[in-house]
Amino acid sequence: MSSSVPLVSVIVPVYNRLQFLPQLFNTIFSQDYDNYEVIIVDDGSTDGTAEWIEENRLKFSKPIHLIRQENAGHYDARNNGLDHANGELIAFQDSDDEWTQYHISQLARLFIDNPDVDWIFGRIQRIDHFTGKVVEDSNFKLKDGKLHPFLKLNSDSRAGGLRVFEDPKIGETAITHRVPGST
């Protein structure tokens, strides 16, 4: 792969997220990893989201590919972003989420070290944006404190804290209980 082609494409669907844009751009551009591109798909915002991005795009350390589309929902926006992605790896970022500064570098390293892995998800903590209160400490546990059923499936532990799931019930469990992670 050429060094001019990013290894990771960060795809962010946005719809009327003006209030979250400073936080979003701070978390994306404070990464300790540099070989990524940023694709923002505006899904028909009416609150000035796309205009804010246009006005501020030169303030950030790398180009922002802004795609505008009629409102069609976040799945369509993600797929539109995929159509424009150049990276070998894809990182979906929700507009109101924050990443640790090592998020992309850690995930890229795990993929490079484990070429047989197709998808990686991680633990998330849900915090109310307005109060700062932790709403859910870990998505790996259910509300009653029990371990999420997905994490009870057969898995193999690897270096870097990676667990590789190889269980015939993975599809059924993912549909029945959702996958408990952030991509």
Image (cartoon, helix red, strand yellow):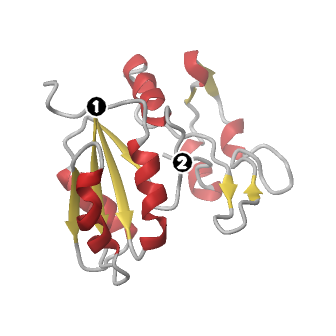
Q: Is residue 72 left or right of 183 when viewed as pictured?
A: left
Q: Is label 1 in a helix, a strand or a loop?
A: loop
- Residue 105 located left or right of residue 54: right
39 to 116, vertically: above or below: below
Q: Is residue 94 visible?
A: no
Determine the residue positioned at 45% across, 56% down: 24
Taking the image as shown, residue 55 lies to the left or right of residue 96, namely left
Say which residue appears at 32% left-offset and 31% top-offset.
Answer: 34
* Residue 35 badge: 1
* Circle 2 residues within 10 Å: few <14, some 14–19, many ≥20: some
Look at label 2 and name its amino acid.
Ser
Identify the element where label 2 is drawn.
loop
Q: On screen, 25 above or below 123?
A: below
**Residue receiving disc 2:** 182
Between 41 and 63, the residue placed more toward the observer is 63
User: Which residue is at a point 43% across and 28% down the rendered structure image?
Assistant: 105
In the picture, the quarter occupied by the N terminus is: top left
First reached walking from the N terminus: tag 2 or tag 1 = 1
Residue nearer the viewer, 74 or 39: 39
Residue 73 lies in quadrant: bottom left
Which amino acid lies under the numbered mark 1 shown in the image of this protein? Answer: Asn
- At which x and y percent is residue 177? 65, 55
Q: Nearer the viewer, mark 2 or mark 1?
A: 1
The location of residue 30, given as percent across then percent down, is 43, 40
